């Protein structure tokens, strides 16, 4: 028989073993299971805010050194749309820039910190605006029933009504955005990750009141109401998952208080308000020179709003997720 051709068998290769998964970095005082610990991230954020403030202030400092403008006392005697828009605009832009930088560092979106663009000026905002205006109206109506408040008539007329309405509406939306994001945006998000939602809310609501303590004519009762406002806004954040309800409520309350009814805000008189008003009676009823924020009716109204809100918004929608 002819020799048979021997065909070699293919070599059997052993499949390569998968590469071992690298061990996660060990937990330290700086790093936790989800990366840099919340406290350090908050310090980085505050450092960025400070750096941006110094950078914005540098031109004015150099102008002062060059002799442009002399130091003088600044006395706040009233609220104007332009002046308030400038101050609150700065208050909104600075932490927003810092939050955008932190979003890149943390691999998140800016909207994760409370102001998602897809919900901007949507249903939550308008519901909050209506409830905010209705709440200040109820507060003033309660003072009226005890003969402590009444309207004196229209304070502006003609074309001024339209221009003042537009100016104050835009201004108080900006106020809501600035104060809500500054105190319940990035800082609330990060501290929630570190110490929990309500401990963070209590801490930041205290800081919110401290920031209002320098307002002319502020009182202890007024500051107590500011703390309650802060906690209520945090409740809105927890129930809706974002800040748009709180922004709307904040804007609606301030718009009704300062522009529509023309009552003082932390002792600062209104400007180009729609109606004139007069208060009579003890400070516990009217709020005294502070305005209705320091009235006994304000915390009562805020507590009622909080109770009713929790009856409708029962679910906790504020979930702080790990970075992607």
Image (cartoon, rainbow, N blue to C red):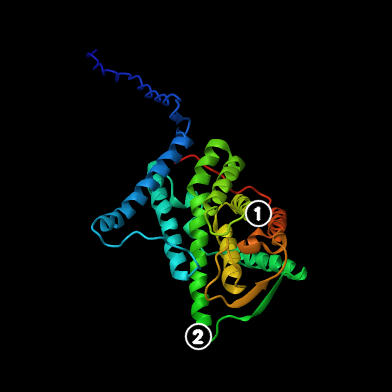
Residue drawn at x 43%, y 51% as measured from the top left: 95
Residue 167: image x %, image y %?
48, 73
Q: Quadrant of the C terminus?
A: top left
Q: Going by the image, does 192 lie left or right of 288?
A: left
Between residue 189 and residue 43, name the one nearer to us: 43
Q: Nearer the viewer, mark 1 or mark 2?
A: 1
- In the image, taking residue 88 as reference, residue 56 lies left or right, namely left
Rendered image quadrant of residue 129? bottom right
Who is closer to the viewer here, 17 or 232? 232
Give the crowd class for mark 1: few <14, some 14-19, many >=20 residues within 10 Å: some
Judging from the image, what secondary structure is the residue with disc 1 in? helix
Q: Which is more N-terminal, label 2 or label 1?
A: 2
Q: Secondary structure at mark 2?
A: helix
Q: Position of residue 3 (x, y in %)?
A: 22, 13
Give the residue at the far bottom of this rendering.
Answer: 158
With respect to residue 152, does 140 lie above or below?
above
Between 251 and 264, the residue placed more toward the observer is 264
- Quadrant in the picture for the N terminus: top left
Cα–Cα span, label 1 and label 2: 38 Å
Neighbourhood count class around disc 2 (C-alpha, 10 Å): few under 14, some 14–19, many 20 upward = few
In the displayed structure, would residue 90 be above or below residue 204? below
Q: Quadrant of residue 56?
A: bottom left
Residue on which the image places disc 2: 159
Q: Where's residue 133, x and y in %?
A: 63, 67
Write the residue at 42% across / 64% down. 86
Name the residue that disc number 1 marks. 221
Disc number placed over residue 18 in the picture, else none: none
In the image, taking residue 218 as reference, residue 72 lies left or right, namely left
Question: Residue visible at 69% across and 56% down?
Answer: 299
Q: Position of residue 161 (x, y in %)?
A: 53, 81
Q: Is residue 131 left or right of residue 104?
A: right
Q: Is residue 122 visible?
A: yes
């Amino acid at each position: 028989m002819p020799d048979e051709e021997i065909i070699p068998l293919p070599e059997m290769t052993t499949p390569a073993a998968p590469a071992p998964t690298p061990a996660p970095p060990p937990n330290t005082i700086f790093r936790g299971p989800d990366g840099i610990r919340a406290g350090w991230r908050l310090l980085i954020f505050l450092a960025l805010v400070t750096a941006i403030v110094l950078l914005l202030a540098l031109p004015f400092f150099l102008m002062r050194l060059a002799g442009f403008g002399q130091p003088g006392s600044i006395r706040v005697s009233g609220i104007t749309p332009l002046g308030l828009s400038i101050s609150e605009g700065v208050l909104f832009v600075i932490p927003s820039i810092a939050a955008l930088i932190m979003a890149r560092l943390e691999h998140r979106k800016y909207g994760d910190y409370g102001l998602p663009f897809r919900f901007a000026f949507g249903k939550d905002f308008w519901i909050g605006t209506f409830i905010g205006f209705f709440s200040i109206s109820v507060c003033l109506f309660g003072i009226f029933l005890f003969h402590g408040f009444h309207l004196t008539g229209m304070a502006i007329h003609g074309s001024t009504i339209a221009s003042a309405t537009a100016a104050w509406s835009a201004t108080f939306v900006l106020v809501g955005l600035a104060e809500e994001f500054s105190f319940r945006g990035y800082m609330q998000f990060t501290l929630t990750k570190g110490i929990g939602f309500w401990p963070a809310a209590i801490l930041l609501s205290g800081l919110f009141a401290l920031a209002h303590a320098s307002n002319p004519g502020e009182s202890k009762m007024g500051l107590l109401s500011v703390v309650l406002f802060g906690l209520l806004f945090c409740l809105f954040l927890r129930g809706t998952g974002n800040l748009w309800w709180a922004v709307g409520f904040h804007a609606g309350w301030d718009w009704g208080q300062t522009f529509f009814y023309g009552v003082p805000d932390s002792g600062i008189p209104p400007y180009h308000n729609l109606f004139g008003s007069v208060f009579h009676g003890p400070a516990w009823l009217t709020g005294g020179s502070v305005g209705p924020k320091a009235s006994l009716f304000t915390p009562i109204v805020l507590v009622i709003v909080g109770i009713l809100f929790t009856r409708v918004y029962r679910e906790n929608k504020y979930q702080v997720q790990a970075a992607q």
